[in-house]
């Protein structure tokens, strides 16, 4: 089995911004601290223990974008807290 290429956090950041998430929200969704997330954005490698869970959540976020047309107009008009609650609601419904 060939090793997976490292994640491009420039693309992850583009996804975060497109989904209208704060850095804190993205870090929480990925199950890490903001400091860890910032490290990844600056080029630090992911630990093997984080790699699969991060990739899984990124796939789920991409699915929300494609399957639900995220961000929908009502989401765009929402405040940050409501936006995150709606996203978590959608993610939990897809389990």
Image (tube, rainbow, N blue to C red):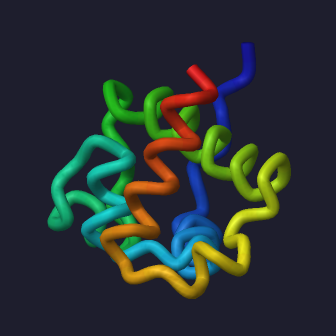
Residue 91, above or below 44: above
Residue 53 against residue 46 in the figure, above or below: above
Q: Position of residue 85 (x, y in %)?
A: 39, 56
Q: Is residue 55 left or right of residue 62?
A: left
User: Residue 38, how many percent across, how many down?
Assistant: 28, 71
- In the rendered image, the vertical position of residue 35 relative to residue 7, given as above or below: below
The residue shown at (21%, 58%) is 36
Residue 75 percent location from the top left of the image: 59, 73
Q: Residue furthest top?
A: 1
Q: Nearer the viewer, residue 41 or 30?
A: 30
Query: What residue appears at the point 63 percent right and 76 percent down from the top-left corner?
Result: 74
Residue in view at x 83 percent, y 47 percent = 67
The one nearer the camera, 31 or 93, is 93
- Where is residue 57 shown, x and y percent of the image? 52, 39
Tell which of 15 and 2 is nearer to you.
15
Q: Residue at x 44, y 46 (%)?
A: 88
* Left or right: residue 15 compared with residue 52: right
Q: Quadrant of residue 76?
A: bottom right
């Amino acid at each position: 089995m060939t090793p997976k290429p490292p994640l491009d956090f420039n693309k992850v950041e583009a996804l975060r911004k497109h989904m209208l998430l704060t850095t804190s929200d993205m870090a929480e969704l990925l199950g890490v601290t903001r400091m860890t997330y910032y490290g990844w954005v600056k080029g630090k490698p992911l630990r093997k223990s984080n790699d699969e869970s991060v990739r899984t959540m990124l796939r789920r976020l991409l699915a929300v974008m494609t399957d639900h047309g995220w961000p929908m107009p009502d989401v765009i008009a929402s405040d940050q807290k409501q936006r995150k609650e709606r996203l978590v609601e959608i993610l939990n419904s897809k389990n």
